[in-house]
Image: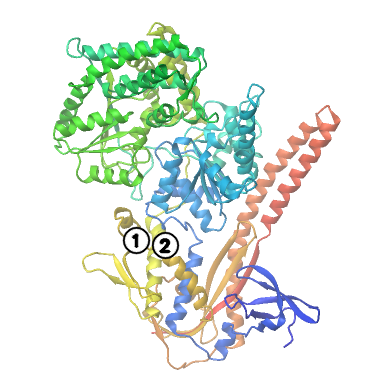
Amino acid sequence: MSIQIGQKVKYNAYPEKSAGIVVAVKTVFGREYADVFFDKPTEKITVLTDELAIFSDDTPETKIKGQTFSASDLFLLRFFKDKYKSLSQEGFRAAANFKILPLPHQLLAVNFVLEHFKPRVLIADEVGLGKTIEAILLYEELKSRHMVKSVLIVTPSGLCRQWQEELKEKFSEDFAIYDKNTIASLKQLHGEETNIWNLSNKIITSIDFIKPKKIHSELNENTVKTREWHNKNVFEAAFNAGFDMVIFDEAHKLTKSLEGDETARYKIGKELSDRVPIFILLSATPHQGDSAKFKNLLSLIDPYQFYKTSDVTSEKVKEVTVRNNKRAVVDFDGNRLFKQRITSLCKISRQEDSDRIEIELYEAVTEYVSKFYNIAKAQNNQTFAFLLMIYQRMVSSSSQAILKSLSKRLNLLTEARSDGSEIVDAILNDELNIDDIEDASTETQLSVLEDNIEVSKNAELNRKYLEMEIEQLEKCVDLARKSAIGRNDAKFKKLIEIIDEVKIRENEIKLKIIIFTEFVETQSYLNKCLKNLGYETAIINGNLSNEEKTQQKKLFKEKAQILISTDAGGEGINLQFCRVMINFDLPWNPMKLEQRIGRIDRIGQEHDVKIINFQLLDTIEQYVRETIERKLEIIKSEFSDGEDKLADILSTLQDDFSFEKIYIDATIKRNNDAKNLEHIAQQIYLKAKQIINDGQLILPISELSDKLSISKKSIFEKNEFARNLLEKYLKCNNKTLNMYKNKKNVYYFEDPVTGRRINNVIFNQEYAVQNDEYELFSFNNPYMVNTLENLDEILSTVNTSKIRIKEEKFAGNKGMWFIYHFNLNNNIDLDRDFIISVFIDEKGCHNNRISNYLNDSENILASDMGSVTFQMTNDQTIETSANMANQKAEEIYYDIVKKNDEKIISTENKMDKYFKDREISVERMAIENIKQAKRKELQAEREKQYADLRKRKKIVPEIYCTQIAVVEFI
């Protein structure tokens, strides 16, 4: 057998490969070899010609002329299978695949990104609108388009676990969290030279872990080595890993000033921006009241559009930013998604007689904190200073909480005194500093700090401070014990009053209430006392596993009246079915309070939410909080939706103002510096107002609804298509899809391959969200994915048939149904498939109505035709159908090329301006060798970017006939 260049061949050793094309033939040592190019999968291999077989011509045109036919149900199964693949590339491909109900504004945001020439944007929706869901939906859409394989998500440290859980729970995606322990383990397993960022395609990490660590002369040798290792294996390895997509949550933390001073966080943002094609920033407050920082943030998205502060105009910002307003968003029926929030302050006064011991305890702890905070700061002991701030918050929470922590501290110091050790209040790991736990919950902070106090044996004791601290601790612990044992705090007494009042006011005896506290010990105290009073309770804290949290949430929803949660426990737990929250203690950072409220004031809440904040009177916390909130209340009154806007900017305010420091400074000064506190409060107010005003000016609300009309049907109809396709597949194998008699729209069937019965199958996405025990059979379901892959091979030769179609409006029509596959590809990020149907009647004329009917039908009632009673296909019919298919394909082609060219021209204009300005800047340089180097650098960048545009401009069309059927309508 002689193998010729250009022949179609099959490779006998690998029958699963499709046909290949011989591209070269050569003889080596007397044996003949051929280079064969295979399209599926795309590869070129060299094999002995003896192992090749000439590919038989089984095209539909050849088979139809030879009157070779397949069964009509198999023919239609292939058609609908191919049609699905085409359909899945239109509109939203992934939105209906998961157990979530995406909302119109979320889908509009995703569409905004998908329409971009390069998917690099800022999603700046207001707090609570689901930026996380939007980002994940975008990832899923891009993944389904084969544009993304590897993704890195960078978040604040306190949100890593929340992202991981949301991805798993709602999207069945398993993401690895990379932190110090992960890196160390992977390095040990795979070796020092391995870039461990390439070991997983789906990674979450924290911004403060991945950022570079500063090296300076004051560090010791070991610390320098440790930081150099980090910068090489974490920072540099991450941006050299070749990720396809990066998502930055809380992106306003990537800051660079007007003068060019950039933070370590900005450095990692810049390095990843330069290397990763798909770059998504999430932030409700990207402007921060600083135009230069905003410009530098936007330049990470588009350096050609935003390289001067004057480029930051609302029109240009709108091109790369999507922003939705919380109180304006609606569901598919036009109903507003958010209810009103009603907040009240419950001031609690402790009585001189009955609560005297509590007052004395508060004063004693405040005195202890004030004295030793100053000592800690003088000794640059950040760990101890941070711990003291927690103690001060704790004494206002409950006597039980402060008793346990101070007792633990006292026992440590007493033990150190007795065995001659020295307490060193420093986190053991030199590389873990206070910044790493600053965003964490108080529960997590306390655990890390208390568990990492170093005890140095046989060290010389600083007995003066040790004895002083032990003496003060003994006093505090004694008072805490007297306050905690055998009596209830004033706050708990008020809590019982409030619970009863709220139930009466809401006129609901079984009203569900969530109580938040910062501390596990306070939670235990409340849980015990409430149970003793007959209340059914549930508890959630950071010590529980995800499964245990889910169980407690279910207990609260179905049975318990009260849920007691810590901040760590409440992260990622959504409780829309509860509408009343009592904050038993208040975190100093208002952003953490807002995060609590977000558990119930969120999408899906059906009632106005009631928030009751407890505040102890005659405390330093009351004084500070009232001073600051008095100013922030002005913001709420100055803007129509001031409360929402304030919630948006709290994250930015906490970066500019250390609320913890404001409180602790007031504690030390014991309210003796009212003027300074008033000044700080005024600065917070002015900054808040500036951020909101500038944000409204530069970051207008997106008007996306005019650009895309979204209906629930258009999003979720693909799952109905999945049901139809599954039914056809089962029918071809003499199986049926059966609905349960007592479960509407819930199905079961027997798998034709394994014989296994598959139960509790549903195709309705809304029903899937409400019922965890049912399995959603979207096209993303593993069974459906596997079935489609198998059908590709099984049906590859099913390309002709004789079909009788039942459709009354076309009854009596006879002819040929030609099905064409049309593909457009630029070998970068465009790969679109289209199915084109052409119906040629028995007279040889094209019937456009029937062609459209066949192409658009979701279901066709058909059976096998007997003998053919009219003229069969001839070359003229084939040519007529090909001409019509080409005509339809050409319309699609030029429409897509036009849109692509418009985007390229827009990008070229931006790049022309950018490079022209850069050239002027380079020519102004005084030092010649530096000028020459910059010229070369600029020229290389120009050539690279324009080469990329040239590649994107080349869209290659391909069209061929895949199926032909003889058709008779009845």
Of 349 and 418, the residue lying toward us? 418
Q: Which residue is mark 2?
A: 781
Instruction: Give above or below for 457 relative to 766.
Output: above
Residue 528 relative to residue 97: left or right: left
Which image quadrant: the C terminus?
bottom left
Badges 1 and 2: C-beta atoms under 8 Å apart?
yes
Q: Check the image and name the residue furthest to the right.
A: 928
- Check the image and report above or below for 252 versus 402: below
Type of the residue with mark 1: Glu
Q: Is residue 451 above or below residue 419?
A: below
In the rendered image, is residue 575 in sight? yes
Closer to the chain start, of discs 1 and 2, is 1
Q: Residues within 10 Å of mark 1 (few under 14, many from 20)?
A: many
Residue 317, image quadrant: top right
Give the x, y percent position of residue 69. 50, 87
Reply above or below: 638 against 867. Answer: above
Residue 251: x %, y % from top left: 52, 36
Dot 1 falls on a residue whose secondary structure is strand
Which disc number belongs to residue 141? none
Q: Is residue 631 left or right of residue 213?
A: left
At 49% from the left and 70% from the top, the residue drawn is: 789
Query: Residue 897, image x and y in percent?
Result: 63, 59
Q: Say which amino acid is labelled 2.
A: Asn
